[in-house]
Image (tube, rainbow, N blue to C red):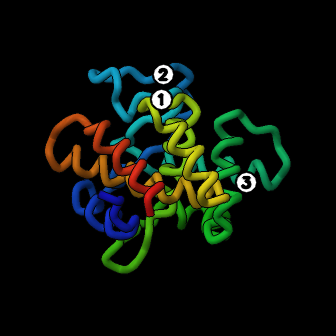
Amino acid sequence: EPCQNYQTINKMTYSINEREPLFFVPHPSRRARIRTTEPSSLLTAQSIYMIFSNDRNELRQMYVNAWRKRGAKLPLEPLETQIAAVVERHPEYHKMLLSSEKAVAKDYSPEMGEANPFLHMGMHLAIQEQVSIDRPPGVKAVFGDLLEKLGDAHEAEHQMAECLVESIWKSQRDKAQPDLAAYLASLQALLLK
């Protein structure tokens, strides 16, 4: 079954953890692959971890700092380069990131029609990481086929992120490991649309 609309998923996940729903972001201190209890977990990645941090503002500040450093043409760490590249493709977030105190502290409410920009950008990073390490196996091929079909990597990431969010939401709802076969099937269904 094809993935649900990203905004719909955002609304559903927001009710699970109002502080920061199902939000993936690279952490600057991560250099090694994260270990999970499930070897084929969606969450296994070099620089991505699921945030249920005590300080979401610190994590959001990484986006602000990377974007400011990019604008000031200061040297960037590899992770900051990835973050800045994602931000660059989202001009609708540029102004928000430059008003850092407001951006970092704001609560985004889907009920008010607000998408969480940090969730959105974090999902791009998560998809990029999955594709780069082909985890779960087959995701890289799906991305390549979707890129060929759409001709736009950014849009391919958007569509794949919908599937990822839905898979994580179902996993959290069911209190179970993500169903990798179902996730991959939902990604493959994107090619049939």
On-image quarter of the N terminus: bottom left
The residue to which callout 2 is attached is: 33
Residue 159: mark = none
In depth, the one of 75 and 179 nearer the eye is 179
Q: Residue furthest left?
A: 174
Distance CA(mark 1)–CA(mark 3)? 26 Å
| Secondary structure of the residue carrying numbered label 1 | loop
- Identified by mark 3, the residue type is Arg
Distance CA(mark 3)–CA(mark 2)? 28 Å
Q: Earlier in the sequence, mark 1 or mark 2?
A: 2
The residue to which callout 3 is attached is: 68
The residue mark sitting in front, 1 or 3, is 1
Q: Is residue 142 above or below residue 71?
A: above
On-image quarter of the C terminus: bottom left
Which percent across, then down, holds residue 3? 35, 59
Q: Residue furthest front?
A: 192
| Secondary structure of the residue carrying numbered label 2 | loop
- Identified by mark 2, the residue type is Arg
Q: Is residue 23 above or below residue 27?
A: below
The residue to which callout 1 is attached is: 45
- At 58% from the left and 60% from the top, the residue drawn is 155
Q: Earlier in the sequence, mark 1 or mark 3?
A: 1
Residue 20 location, quadrant = bottom left
Does the residue at mark 1 contact the one at mark 2 (Cβ under 8 Å)?
yes
- At 21% from the left and 46% from the top, the residue drawn is 172
